[in-house]
Image (tube, rainbow, N blue to C red):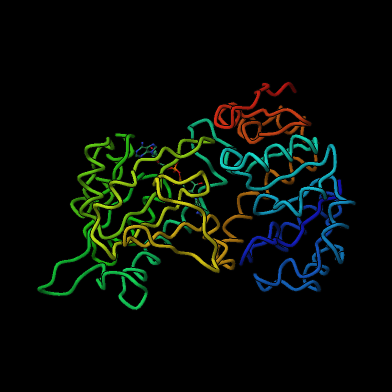
Amino acid sequence: MIIGVPKEIKNKENRVGMVKAGVLALTQNGHNVLVQSGAGTGVGISDEEYERSGARIVDSAKEVYDRSDMIVKVKEPLPEEYPLLREGQILYTYLHLAADERLTKALLERKIVGIAYETIQSADGSLPLLAPMSAVAGRMATQIGATYLQKDHGGKGMLLGGVTGVDRANVVVLGGGTVGINAIAMAVGLGARVSVLDVNVPRMDYISDVFRNEVTTLYSNPEQIERSVSKADLVIGAILVPGAKAPKLVTRELVSKMEAGGVIVDVAVDQGGSVETCRPTSHEHPTYTVDGIIHYAVPNMPGAVPRTSTYALTNVTLKHAVTIANLGWKEAVQKDAALRKGVNIALGSLTYEQVAKDLNLPYEALRV
Ligand SMILES: NC(=O)c1ccc[n+]([C@@H]2O[C@H](COP(=O)([O-])OP(=O)(O)OC[C@H]3O[C@@H](n4cnc5c(N)ncnc54)[C@H](O)[C@@H]3O)[C@@H](O)[C@H]2O)c1
């Protein structure tokens, strides 16, 4: 198979879909890898290094898409990339379709096979290809929240951990999954007063076991959310209902009840956001203010730390890339139930039920 690795073009997205180890593994399995010139610059991998690992460097994204059977990327294609996709081509990347009807329709029209990292799901319900990026984004969320709470960044001028004799900040984390627990670990480490709201009681048991009295676990319902968020200095949105649009847990009215200069980091923005006032921003213009509350809602947060996140991501994506390349996508998904769940689009059919529901488009079960 010919595997293509284009350069990412999303704003300030410096990650790349494959590192040298991936090129080596695929070429050792008898495949050819085409890498767009400059694709690894943001991570410090030069064209020459890719070549030494066995890749062929090509000049343009068009050439990568024209010649490859499978495209391995990081972020979903942007409109200028839609026309490059070819019928029957495998697109293996993050897709987040529930939040993007235009992309979904474009992928259906192009009749590609869209395998989404974020919906590949193990038997225990975990999302192994989302987890490393969620860990990165969760850790960043607290760092970013702490920065925007500073007066010089427009915030209320508060140190997360306070100092002796002065109260610390209230951090409220909505969702105690991978993003949530990583955000919590950083917030606890910085000395903040931390609460987490979730609907998964065993998960909250786990968080209580790990963090003991340093974190308050609260069952997530509208009353509890209202009570916690209205007193929060920093709210971190970390909800996920797999494949679905994020539920809007924080209303506009509730945002207005927070004290001015507070900060919301809605990590779940890639699934539409868990805060009513949330809309996607970019690394170039990461924040906006509503009712005096700073909103940070960058959908590709890990793109800002590409050296950490590219390796964390490709550590978990490579295994499936090799299987798909070796067996073809149909046999690969027949043999691997987790990978099968990743197939969101198959040759003109929308094969992920929750996405179809969210976008009100027809669903067809995958038939392979
Ligand atoms: N912005 C970014 O750059 C970025 C990066 C990585 C992940 N994400 C996104 O962050 C979100 C969270 O990802 P994750 O890996 O932590 O998911 P996860 O599945 O590990 O955790 C989600 C948690 O939300 C909880 N939850 C669901 N409904 C809830 C509700 N009504 N109230 C409270 N909790 C609820 C679940 O029980 C679960 O514990 C996802 O949308 C993911 O795509 C964004």
Q: Would you say 50 lies left or right of 132 here?
A: right
> Residue 268, percent across and down?
46, 48
Q: Using the rendered image of the protein, determine whether residue 340 is visible from the camera's viewpoint.
A: yes
Give me the residue at 23% from left, 68% from top.
161
Relative vertical location of residue 57 with respect to residue 29 in this rendering, above or below: below
Check the image and name the residue furthest to the bottom. 152
The picture quadrant for ligand 1 comes to: top left
> Residue 360, percent across and down?
59, 27
Relative vertical location of residue 79 with respect to residue 224 in this rendering, above or below: below
Q: To which quarter of the image does residue 348 belong?
A: top right
Task: Locate the N terminus and report the quarter of the image it occupies.
Answer: top right
Give me the residue at 26% from left, 67% from top.
160
Give me the residue at 26% from left, 60% from top.
233
Q: Using the rendered image of the protein, determine whether residue 327 is visible from the camera's viewpoint.
A: no
Give me the residue at 55% from left, 31% from top.
358
> Residue 35, percent across and down?
80, 61
Q: How many marks?
A: 0
Task: Locate the C terminus and report the quarter of the image it occupies.
Answer: top right
Q: Would you say 203 lies left or right of 23 here?
A: left
Q: To which quarter of the image does residue 258 belong?
A: bottom left
